[in-house]
Image (cartoon, rainbow, N blue to C red):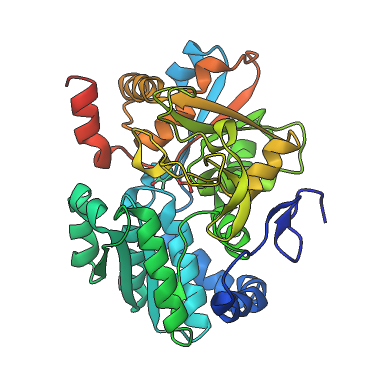
Amino acid sequence: MSKYDVTSEGFYGRFGGAYIPEMLYPNVENLKKVYLEILNSEKFKSQYKQLMKDYVGRPTPLFYAEKLSSIYSTHVFLKREDLAHTGAHKINNAIGQVLIAKEMGKTRIIAETGAGQHGVATATACALLGMECHVYMGEVDIERQAPNVARMRMLGAEVVPAKSGNKTLKDATNEALRDWISNPEDTFYVIGSTVGPFPYPDLVARLQSIISEEMRWQLKEQTGKELPDYVIACIGGGSNAAGSFYHFVNDEQVKLVAVEAAGHGLDSGDTAASIARGSEGIIHGARTMLMQTDDGQIIEPYSISAGLDYPGIGPMHSYLAEVGRETVLSATDDEALQAALQLTREEGIIPALESSHALAALPKLKFRSDENVVVTISGRGDKDMATYINHLKL
Ligand SMILES: *Cc1c(COP(=O)(O)O)cnc(C)c1O
């Protein structure tokens, strides 16, 4: 076991754990007991592998970006999660968790979603695998994210409006948890990032680790070397970054760079940079870095990118950042928009706004000309066209 591994109680250093109300204990304990056994079973491995290949379209390409390489005087590779079915990495996790739910004999899936991306991935996995699906979503978010709501409904999911509080993600999470407490026997709660009580952060990281597993052999094939010098990924809750870093964490010479959303700027008050501007506390059942007031009230995060607009961060990243294994940078809305435009003009790829934050780290780092730099493009930009049109004056 390496010093970076999660403990059997779910801790990364002092971060993580499962700080949950007593009524949730049986559900979480039950999952904790079986998840590793299922993940390591031949049956799960072969089903997951097959669906990743034939349904999701994996392996996603590792693309050598010639023009970006020349601009940044190094070798830039893009890990193309934007080419996965449904247009982002979230499907890797959703399919994995729904397979686990089936294996546990569950018949009903619940999830919560903010921007709707995780809801769409979960509804997709449920349509494919024949599971009943209920997605909790704040009433305000339902209005803001109409296209994703329509997708979920077309896929056969019920979108349940959360009408309490601010009517956004936090309220949807509360209602999903209430549902899970009332339906412990037949229901599985699919969480969309490396957040929540243990074992979710570890479960999601393992399911997304297929990203770095592929990077290793793809780099070897293209460069002769399995290890890159840098891996760069954006972090909202931290799942695409966790998946991109997973198989490199113990190779200390590989620099791991996570990029948070600075919003209007780290000191503007409108930011989602939970590590740079947060402090330690408990959110969604885990001890981690989060944005809170001195008396522990959660501060509403802000980012131009809906997928990075989360007040906390997966506990694994709080730990890797604290011990210096992962470098945490941030990118503002404007820097992300410029990075999106650059990738589009130079390479003909319109990235998701989330992924644009990872790209915005390139001008902030000093590379040598012989280094290999991998940037994870977590998703495609179709969903963000209205924002691009607005801000880039298209
Ligand atoms: C949801 C999302 C993210 C942020 O979530 P992580 O768990 O931090 O990966 C990043 N990129 C895209 C395209 C997303 O949909």
60 is higher (above) or lower (below) than 189: above
Q: Quadrant of ligand 1?
A: top left
Please tell me which residue lies in front, 58 or 350.
350
275 is higher (above) or lower (below) than 126: above
**Residue sitting at 46 percent across and 18 percent down?**
68
**Residue sitting at 62 percent across and 73 percent down?**
35
Please tell me which residue lies in front, 25 or 98.
25
- Is 176 left or right of 64, judged from the image as shown? left
Q: Quarter holding the N terminus?
A: bottom right
29 is higher (above) or lower (below) than 124: below
Please tell me which residue lies in front, 167 or 263.
167
Number of numbered labels in the structure image: 0
**Residue sitting at 65 percent across and 21 percent down?**
371
**Residue sitting at 44 percent across and 77 percent down?**
180
Residue 330 location (% of width, % of height): 52, 27
Please tell me which residue lies in front, 288 or 333.
288
Q: Is residue 226 visible?
A: no
- Is 348 left or right of 242, judged from the image as shown? left
Q: Quarter holding the C terminus?
A: top left
Please identify the residue farthest to the front as the structure is shown.
295
Residue 77 location (% of width, % of height): 52, 29
